[in-house]
Amino acid sequence: MSGFARPLKIALGLAVIAALIIVPMNFNRYGLFILSQWAVMSIAAMGLNLTLGYAGQVSLAQGAFVGIGAYAAAIMTTHGWPLPAAILVAIVLSFAIGWVLGYPALRVQHHYLAFVTLAFSTLAFLVFRNESWLTGGIYGISNIPRPHIFGLATNKPLPFYYVCLGSLAIVSLAVWWLIRSPWGRAFMALRENPLRAQSLGIDTRRYTLMAFAIGSALGGVAGALYAPLTQYIDPVPFNLSLSLDLLLMVIVGGAGFYFGPFLGAMIAVLLPEWLRFTEGYYLMLYAVAVMLLLIWSPTGILGILDRYLAERRTKAASALRAVAKSRLETVQ
Amino acid sequence: MSNLFDLLVAGLATGAIYALVALGFTLLWQTSQTINFAQGEFVMLPAFLMLAAMHVGAPFWLAIILGILLSMILLGLAFKLLLVDPMMRHGVLPLAIATMALAIGIKEAVKQFYSAEASPFPSIVPTGEVSILGHAVSLQSIGVLTVAILAVLGLTTLLNRTSLGHQMQAAAQNPTVARIIGVPVERMIMLTFLINAFLVALASLLITPIYLAKFSSGEVLGQAAFIAAIVGGFNQVRGAIAGGLLIGVLDNLAAAYVSTQYRAAVPMLFLIAVILFRPQGLLGRAEERTV
């Protein structure tokens, strides 16, 4: 994105934020639900982008963390706790479990890690389904209340959309700060060359665990917002396919790009709505499109943009060089 | 009623099918570093190809042949040429993710073009039981075991006793040197994709009469095969076989002795334990790229 001038970028960002606040005011209940869902999934995908895109650790368990957060929020808020407390518990719980799940990542990499996290996903699903004393089993938990923020009820779709959007904004800022901090640089060092990172004095063990834990915690946040959004949860949405969907969101948007998860979540959440006319063929088309995209650009849509901008920059630079050279020659 | 012997026989029969699937999975990994996350869907699809062939009037035996041939074209040739070859240069992980998308695509295609409901599938072995050592053993189990053992024996003979098999092994172990000594490496890799397609079609033929033909049945099968492959050892043919049998038996014992609710958790916990304490697998060699 560095190809644009800075004021232009800021103006563009402000315009998008303003649009996200103003445009949905006229949306109906369903449109707001979809947009809120986009915000929630963006948060979860952003977490996975930290783990996968920045730190290079494959995880097929992000859906399980969304589930953990959702159940934490559902159980607590139906027992009278306020949502912010539930979000806090979801963060701590997902962070701790994510930390433990990171341990296999210290021993194995890539597809092995994918299988460990896949196994964890399945185990989490079994717990959601079978521990009915806690999770309501296959009947799930219903009547999940929506919170009061600063004394304002958010029962209606529009206020709750602003809750989701606000949370997305807070998480986005935190992630923006994180990837620019020494931690974010350490994550990238981990992805690019773990051996070199270690020889430069980066505690790769700690940062690997951290990458897992923080990414998982964001999954928990997303889950804690998902529960009051749908107001009813059961185990089905948190099975392995959610983890796969989130992974595809990150990959399609562009793993390792800050804006990748926003774009990926938008495509995964909004596209089905726009492609309604294709009826049941939608997922098939999506799968084919993802495969074609990966063949063309394994770094996703933003990877294509990035390559295009880089090319333009090199062209501009070589043009400048040519001008400088010709000037030099005329002087001589 | 269900005693240990029956459980073991049933476990070995499902395990033999898992072994076939895991075998193909490890072959693809060895020759082309392809992690096929769609392997379970690869097992699900051939049964539907055979059902479709029967729908247009083909007798069962012809449907089987057509199904296997079509599988080899679609899941072997087309998979290799259209997805694996163009993705190969991007590395292991993007290819693995592309196969996840392929899995979704195959599942949805079957759901849309065939049916979302489970369909019954004829068995190649007649139903009935025979008595072995005083235990009633179903012909189904015996038939499955026999076919699977024959397939594994055929494959190991091909790999270890024939010149073609030696060329395939050479292409897998060291493509550069294999190329220098004149092994057509590309053709050998294609051959493993065709063998994988044949194995999954065979597994499909054996397992679908037991679990019915359903678009979503690949998920469980695929996971069982991954676990079998990793538990046995990713880089060993005999590892995949041992892993498959072990997971099959474990699965059946867990169903009987652990609560049915947590039955599915047992192979998963076993997988996590193996990856943590012996990541090269029970029979595998430690290998640079696995850890």
Image: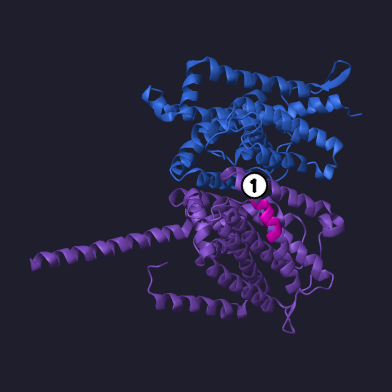
Other-residue count near label 1 (Cα within 10 Å), few / some / many at <14 / 14–19 / ≥20: some
A110 on left or right of B206: left
Q: Name the residue carrying label 1.
A: A104
Look at label 1 and name its amino acid.
Pro
Image chain in blue: B
Residue A101 lies in the magenta stretch: yes
**Figure colour of chain A:** purple
Range shown magenta: A95-102
- Judging depth in this view, the residue of B74 and B159 nearest the camera is B159
The residue shown at (77%, 35%) is B251
Q: Is residue B180 above or below residue A70?
A: above
Q: Position of residue B93 (x, y in %)?
A: 52, 46
The residue shown at (74%, 66%) is A89
- Judging depth in this view, the residue of A194 and A157 nearest the camera is A194
The residue shown at (49%, 36%) is B80
| Chain letter belonging to callout 1 | A
The residue positioned farthest toward the bottom in the image shown: A151
Q: Position of residue A152 (x, y in %)?
A: 73, 84
Residue A300 lies in the magenta stretch: no
Residue A165 falls in image quadrant: bottom right
Q: Position of residue B140 (x, y in %)?
A: 77, 24
Q: Quadrant of the N terminus of chain B?
A: top right
Residue B252 falls in image quadrant: top right
The residue positioned farthest toward the left in the image shown: A332
